[in-house]
Structure formats: structure tokens, C-alpha cells
Image (cartoon, rainbow, N blue to C red):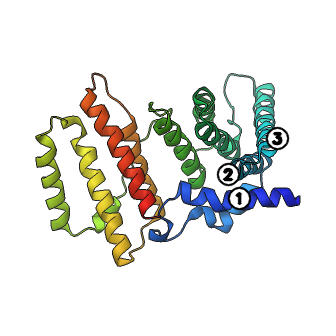
Amino acid sequence: MPLSSHVLLESYISHAPPAIYPLERCLESNPMRSDTWFRFAVGDEAMLNGILYAGALYAGMKREILWYYGETVRIVGGRLREEVERVGNEGGMGGGGDEGIGAVSCLAVGEAMAGRQELWRIHMEGIKNMLKVRKSNKPLQGMVEAKIRRADITGATTYATHPSLSYTPSPTPPIWTLLPPALRLSLTLDSKSFFERTSISPLIPVLSHLILFTKTISLASKTKTKLDPKTFTENLWALEYQLTGSTEGERAIEKGMRFACLLYLKGVLGDWM
């Protein structure tokens, strides 16, 4: 690997892990700092070029941004064309593999950061289609899912629009089960009582969960309790998807509250990083 690529990889490793798994010091580990992730990331040409593009973006290296963007598009596009030629368009497509999906997520985040909403949406729609025709019955590689969720949410919050992907909350008990039961009940009842007086009934469940989520983070920070990174990010995604998804007939006060909560959540994550 050329020296310049090492610089970009270093840039990515410095910036991406805390962006995708925030509050590292409150987590048991950051999966994106593992040997497993590193081998997965550098062992595939598309994924590696996507990561080098992201590293160039973080480092502000314009020439490298253009080069690795083009290389990532070329490699992923080539794989998809090969699949079409091999099996036709009647089924059996593989969607470019999990590595291809991860590579495109790098491009989507880049467009969200650069303020190009149309291109962000195009990349997210591409990811959606790649997921639809994915061959494997196994769950998506955990860190690839983390990357596409972060790409989706980053664009949705940046452009005040709905996410491209849907999200079904995990059945795993949330991190706030770490709170004492009496405290959980008190916070839930108090928040429900308060918000029922504000005429924003549709948002009460997510607001209650947001309060429990941030209270758990505060407790973990003070007591040095380590949170499971998978459960933490799943709970975070569930909150973010609910707060970015508008409903039909939503009133201005509800829309304003959703965006206020997103700003609050971003501030909380930043404060404890």
C-alpha cells in the first residue's frame, strides 16, 4: 500500500470510529477498532477504496477525494454489471456483496457532509436496492450495517428529510434496563405526565425513551459502567429513525419538537465524547 494510502487510512481510523460508534469511553469496545473490521475493510478492493475516499474527505485532500470516489464507483459499478451479464435481471443477483454496500455507504456519508442532497439520496437508494437483491441469508455484517445507518441518518438530519431506509427496533432489552426499576418508572411517568399537557401525544413514547437513553448515558459516565456497543447503537438508531420520520398530518409543534430532540441528542453525544 502506498504511503499516501496509509495517511488516508490513518485519517479514517481517527475520525470514523467515534462518528459511527459515539461515546467510545462509555462502551465496552468500538467494533471499528477491531482486527476483524480492519481485515474486512482492507481485504476488499471496493471497501478499501471507499474507506480511502472517506479518509481523504476527513483530511480535506481534494485530489484524493475525486480519485477514490471515482475508483469506488468504478469498482462497485463493474461488479454489478458483471452480475447482470452473468444471471440477467430475473433474479439471483448478489447486490455487489456486503463489501460493495459498505463502500457505497462511504460515498453516501460524503455527499451528506458535502451538502449534495440529491447524490446522497441516489447513493442511499442504491444501497436499498443492493440490500433487496442481496444473496446471503445471514444478517448484514454488523459494522456494515452501522455504516449504512449512519449514512442514512446523517443525510436525513442534515437535510431535514426522511431517511431512505426503514428500521425495525431490536427485540434486545434496551440499555436503560441498567437503570434501577423505580427510577425508570418514575422517569417514564413524569415525562408522560409533562408531555401530555403539551399536545404532542404522538411523540410521547419516543420522548420517554430519549429521556431514559440519556439518563443511562449519564449514569454510565459517572459510574464508569460500560455499555454494549451493539445495543447502544441499536437504541440510538431507533431514536434517530423515529425523530427523523414525519407522519401524515404532523403539526408544526410536533415537527419543531422532533428537530429540537435531534439537536439535543447530538449535543448529548458530543458532550460525552
Name the residue tied to disc 2: 58
Amino acid at the residue labelled 2: Tyr
Residue 155 versus residue 35: which sits nearer the camera? 155
User: In the image, 240: left or right of 198?
Assistant: right
Asked whether residue 231 appears in the rendered view, the answer is no
Choose the circle earlier in sequence order: 2 or 3.
Answer: 2
Residue 88 versus residue 224: which sits nearer the camera? 224
Task: Give me the residue at 68% from left, 56% from top.
Answer: 12
Amino acid at the residue labelled 1: Ser
Q: Mark 1–mark 2 contact, CB under 8 Å? A: yes
Q: Secondary structure at mark 2?
A: helix
Choose the circle earlier in sequence order: 1 or 3.
Answer: 1
In the image, residue 73 above or below residue 37: above
Residue 82 percent coordinates (x, y): 81, 31
Residue 127 percent coordinates (x, y): 61, 35
C-alpha gap between disc 1 and disc 3: 16 Å
In the image, residue 244 above or below residue 118: below
Quarter where residue 124 is shown: top right
User: In the image, 23: left or right of 174?
Assistant: right
> Seen from this angle, which residue lies furthest bottom?
223
Q: Secondary structure at mark 3?
A: helix
Asked whether residue 4 appears in the rendered view, the answer is yes
Name the residue tied to disc 1: 11
Neighbours of disc 1 within 10 Å: few (<14), some (14-19), many (20+): some
Name the residue tied to disc 3: 67
User: In the image, 255: left or right of 150?
Assistant: left
Q: Assign the N terminus to one quadrant of the image.
A: bottom right
Neighbours of disc 2 within 10 Å: few (<14), some (14-19), many (20+): some
C-alpha gap between disc 1 and disc 2: 7 Å
Quarter where residue 247 is shown: top left
